[in-house]
Amino acid sequence: MLGKGTLCFSGLFLTISCLFVYRLILHPLSRFPGPKLAAATKWYEFYYDIVKSPGGQFAKEIERMHDQYGPIVRINPDEIHIRDPLWFDTLYAPNPTQRDKYPPAARMAGLPLGSHGTVEHGIHRKRRVANAPLFSKRAIISDGQNLIQQHVKELIGIFEEHFTEGKPIQLDTVLLAFTTDTLYHYAFDRESGLMSDPKAARSWRNAMVSVAAATPFIKQFPWILRIVRAFPHAVLSYLLPDVSRLLGVHMTMMSLVSEYIATRDDRPRPTEKELQGDSNTKIGLERPPTLFHSIERSALPPHEKSAVRLQQEGTTMLFAGSETTARLLAHTIFHLLDNPDVVQKIKDELLEVMGDDKQIPDLKILEKLPWLTASVRESLRLRAATTSRLPLVSKTTLAYKGWVIPANTPVSMSHPDVLHNPTIYPEPLKFDPERWFNPSEQANRSFVAFGKGTRMCQGMDFAYAEMYITLATLFLRFDLELFETYRGRDIDYVRDCFLAEASPSSQGIRVKVVSNSGKYIN
Ligand code: HEM
């Protein structure tokens, strides 16, 4: 007689064997190239992202798969990945092409009600439209740049303080405090006060490091966030400090929403004409004071304006818009200091447009400066900030070369495959701003640092404004040098935690102020 244990084990063995046979032989993706083990089980991905040191290694394993199997690969039982820059515009096509986000990818940040976490194409469009008035170029030119300058002045104060004390500046922390303060002010009309509180700034930085560390894990088990939310905060911070810090950010945003709801002005809703931004009506032109007002004034139905929806959109914005730009700024400063001739060219072109004026020029002028523009663009290309593949789902079949990808299959591509393609960008890992002086049409089309299509970055113009104004001011005002910062250890991408992460042994990006001109912005 067989024991119960043996029966259970045999049953399990049979079920798993049937599943493997289905996935490898009968599944609609069974003919696509790729490793059999990856096609059979998602534990393959788990191994590379969680077990293999230093974590977040599946993105690199996908590269290896392409080297072996070609441009189209089945990377797990359900998903196809394509490495071909010429196909990027097909997958990440603009509206009206309909693309849903693959639900496991959408759930990754635990914010399914925020625009970035929205699965369905139609709902995503409406949520984006509701946020748009805050992030329009016009709003950034009229309000954003003054506000950014205001916070850059504070940043100058921090640089001066470090100069006086002869201490290196930890750019990762200081610039994150700067981008968070600025975004808080712009999107929520509140002070987060991180730049004036170094301890709080370090703690926020640690929260971001924790979020990055937790990301590969949450990517594998997105349901974990729902379960841990039920834990008391004290228990959670003891058991899972990284996840607890992440949920702490969600809670802080909920307090902002509660404050907003308690004090909001319950004026009648604007008319349809006003909502559509008619040029003769005020509401369409006015920048809403906060993201919450922007959503409230939109044509979204009432359930889309609930407290939890506002909280999730607000948290999405905070995550999407603070660490990304801070990191980009820090990386650009690194590459510029590593190439002092480019710094000199940026200073020369700035001084030329300024003449006798002692103020940093308007954003519209900065955006026309060739060396500053090329350096920002080159840094964005080289950094390829989003290293995770970005899976979308098409409701109709997709064709790639001779392959027909069945409808509803998650298909992904990865930004570094495009931004570091050696045919489009020769010597792709070299910081070479000059490549943007006379770029090929393909080089321009393949500049996907902010994504493309319907899911493209919504804060791109805000990020550009922060980068232009900050870099111009810092390099005119100060002479800087790198402090114990090395490309291999502190800059290059080693782990994929949605964003590119450097080696765990990195000490961060640090600089010292060598001299302070005391000029330009007082
Ligand atoms: C240099 C800085 C930045 C880079 C490189 C960057 C890059 C990106 C990329 C690649 C995506 C697409 C991600 C995906 O498809 O999953 C994205 C989405 C997004 N970004 Fe950014 N971003 C930056 C700064 C910002 C800023 C400053 C904000 C807000 C103020 C912002 C807000 C967003 C939002 C809301 C989304 C989601 C868009 C959607 O799904 O509709 N980003 N960003």
Image: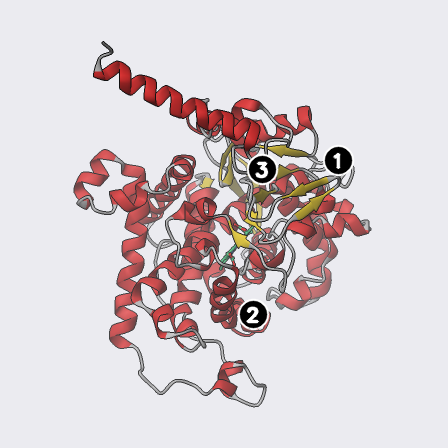
List x then y, in percent, for residue 413: 61, 42
Identity of the residue drawn at 56% across and 44% down: 409
Residue that numbered label 2 is attached to: 136
Residue found at x 38% / y 53%: 111
Q: Is residue 120 visible?
A: yes
* Mark in the foreground, 3 or 2: 3
Q: Residue placed at 74% from the left, 56% from the top?
A: 370
Residues at marks 2 and 1 touching, judged by CB atoms closer than 8 Å: no
What's the CA distance linking mark 1 and mark 3? 33 Å
Which of the 4 image quadrants contains residue 32?
A: top right
Secondary structure of the residue carrying tag 3 is: loop
Label disc, if present, on residue 422 of the rendered structure? 1
SS under mark 1: loop
The amino acid at mark 3 is Pro
Res. 28 mark = 3
Mark with earlier residue (3, 2): 3
Q: In front here: 89 or 477?
A: 89
Q: Earlier in the sequence, mark 1 or mark 3?
A: 3
